[in-house]
Image: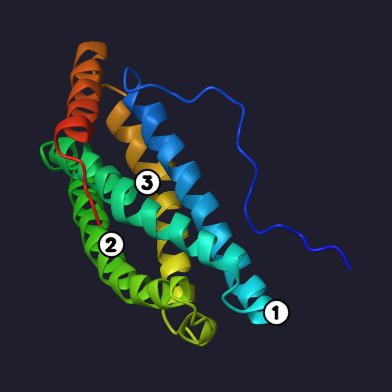
Amino acid sequence: MATVPILEPGRTALAPTFEQPLHMLQACHERVLRMCTLLERLQAHAATHGADEQARQAARDILRYFDIAGPHHHEDEERHLFPRMLASGDARQVELADTLHQQHLAMAELWQKLRAELELLEGGDAAPLLGSAVAAPFLEAYRAHIACEEDDAYPRVFADVPEEQQRAWGEEMAQRRISQPRLA
């Protein structure tokens, strides 16, 4: 019986650049969703194959993504989108910014619990991830959060952001990643 790889092959499409911060934020969401799918595939794989090398590599990939890129993405939103939403004077925007901020905090807390399970799998013990009480809430939280941002927050915020302001946001986003890398 042939084994189906749990890791996705590389993508060939050109990635957006920081010159287009909206597209960059959306591309981050695509990567988050791919990591969520990888986590589901990892759980299914580990149920059959345990903490084999393929499972350990998938765990490392998920750990690396949510330890480095995930926090940068949340910080981008906290620094650029949320202040604009809070200053809009629109009660719905203010409430949405607060909701999204609270979701960031909740997802960070869920991540710390899930992170511990993935580290154990990376070390050879798949049992905690297989019996995880946090993986499903983590996946659900991220998927709902992304839908909320893309359906409501991003269209409202980016509808009237001048191009020069977007360029400044993109430059700051890129510079922060160069000068302040997050290491796990």
Displayed quadrant of residue 79: top left
Question: For the residue marked with disc 1, what is the amino acid?
Answer: Thr
Q: Residue 39 at x, y = what percent?
A: 53, 64
Q: Do the residues bearing badges 3 and 1 touch, measured as CB atoms within 8 Å?
A: no
Mark 2, residue position: 103
The N terminus lies in which quarter of the figure?
bottom right
Image coordinates of residue 137 in percent, x first then y, are 43, 74
User: Vertically, is 101 above or below 141?
Assistant: above
Residue at position x 25%, y 23% from top? 170
Determine the residue positioned at 33% across, 42% down: 153
Q: Give how far apart the Cα atoms at labels 3 and 1 are.
A: 36 Å
Q: Which mark is residue 124?
A: none
Disc number for residue 149: 3
Of residue 160 and residue 32, the one placed in the foreground of this image is: 32
x then y, percent, for residue 178: 21, 30
Mark 1 or mark 2, which is nearer the start of the sequence? 1
Disc nearer the start of the sequence (3/1):
1
- Label 2 residue SS: helix
**Residue at point 37%, 36% (across, down):** 25
Classify 10 Å Cα crowding around label 1: few (below 14), some (14-19), many (20 and above).
few
Crowd around label 3: few <14 · some 14–19 · many ≥20 (10 Å): many
Residue 20 in the image: x percent, y percent? 35, 20
Relative to 73, does residue 53 appear above or below in the rendering?
below
Indicate left or right for 145 with 84 as reference: right
Identified by mark 2, the residue type is Gln
Q: Nearer the viewer, mark 3 or mark 1?
A: 1
Q: Secondary structure at mark 1?
A: helix
Mark 1, residue position? 48
